[in-house]
Image (cartoon, rainbow, N blue to C red):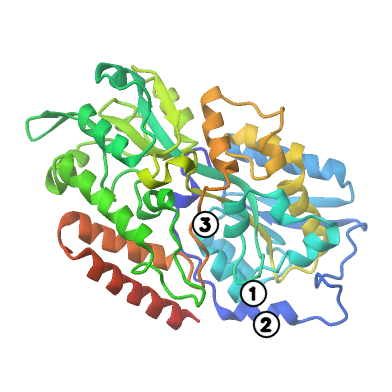
Amino acid sequence: MPTAIPGVARKAAFALTASAVLLTAACTGQSDSGATDDPSQDTTINFWHAWSAPNEVKAVKSLVAGFEHAHPNIHVNVVGNMTDDKINQALRAGGEKAPDVISSFTTNNVGKFCSSGALVDLNPFFEKSGIDPEKTFPKPMNEYTQFDGDRCTVPLLGDAYGLYYNKTAFEKAGIARPPRTWSEFEADARKLTIRQGNGYKQLGFMPDYHGWESTTEHYLGQFSPTYFDKNGKSNLAKDPAFEKGFTLQKKLVDELGGFERLERFRATLGDEWGPKHPFHTGQVAMQLDGEWRLGMAEEAKPGFEIGVAPLPVPDDQAGQYGKGYITGTIAGIAATSHKQNAAWELVKYMTTDTDAVVGFANDIHNVPSTLAALKSPKLKYDPRFKTFLDIAANPHSTTSPASVNGGVYLVTIQQFGYDYESGKATDLKAGLKKTAAQIDTDIAQAQ
């Protein structure tokens, strides 16, 4: 994921069409993986990615150089800064210049990638290589790279969400350690809030869903919800985790000043990606965010010591403290590619070779995406960064599941969150039921 803007924040939809499906079964007499090219022969493949910052582009080049050194017969043409739309168009069109391998920041679209056939199922390739994904990748990453038994993508580094806190503010408020349960978090957020006029001199936490990374899925991840039942229907109105999550957020909004006051204050604060982010400036004492925030916050030279911890958990799940929400970059092989075996060699190297994964993680400061890499002594990081490594490796950590229409269901849930926190919707149970029905309708129309 990029060091500036993480993939989960880039919600641009791929709008994949069914036209890609016919490409998946166009050949006969193929191996189990569906590929017929000989990767031992001299060949060139195209790799499209979305990284654009200079340090990221340099890191990708270094990663590919390591692959070419290990596979001197396979040459890689790297194309960077490719938008989701451009990648999608190329996956549909194919052709000599189209990508053989792609990487995307948008894990929410795995369901589209897999169900449309735009990317090939990688299960046969893993089996042929003797690699067990369940023993290779952290559980949430293993889950968000497949849909309906089709593993059309693979993790390529990840993001883990935790809690950043202002140690100086904590000391002044008499708080000895970061909160571990949501009830402790509520109490700390109140203690850390200093009102001033119609706003705040210091806000303990910005709970609004319009805030920085405080989306519904990031909150709900700490409640370990089940988004869909075994029949693929929305579980929003049935799993009590959702009601508890929405109730917790609304309580924070009300206790910290109310929606209108918080929104007025939020409008005065700096943007998420600049040095004037409200956590950097000390205007907000606690921040829900991903691993990239640590480097950005330190670069802003805050006038306080930054603390990092896992996000709190519900009081009745105190034993699972340490878990968090996980997402990340994904990689896959285009169904239009005629060099899928060679493409697999690149994908396999980038995503399962421990030294390659560790080196890439070190270069762009993201979370390694294999269990072995998470434990590698070659990892270089600020001691506080280990919090995110532990969250990624925690078996209780969660992610949001793939859907046939991508992240549409998450957008629908978020929209209800806006209505509920603002008071536009007042009946939580009825709202969850209505939102669940809308999700089911949207999915049925996409199938």
User: Around disc 3, counting alpha carbons within 10 Å, would you say few (fewer than 14), some (14 to 19), or many (20 or more)?
Assistant: many
Q: Is residue 389 above or below residue 216?
A: above
Which residue is depicted at the point 24% across and 58% down? 418
Residues at circles 2 and 1 in contact by the CB criterion of under 8 Å:
yes
What quarter of the picture does the N terminus occupy?
A: top right
Which residue is depicted at the point 66% across and 69% down? 150
Which residue is depicted at the point 61% across and 52% down? 139
Image quadrant where residue 353 sits: top right
Residue wearing tag 2: 22
Picture coordinates of residue 398, whole percent (x, y): 50, 52
Q: Does the rendering let one see residue 365?
A: yes
**What whole-number distance in Å separates the C-alpha atoms at marks 2 and 1?**
8 Å
Residue wearing tag 3: 106
Residue wearing tag 1: 117
Which residue is depicted at the point 40% across and 43% down? 313
**What whole-number distance in Å separates the C-alpha atoms at marks 2 and 3?**
24 Å
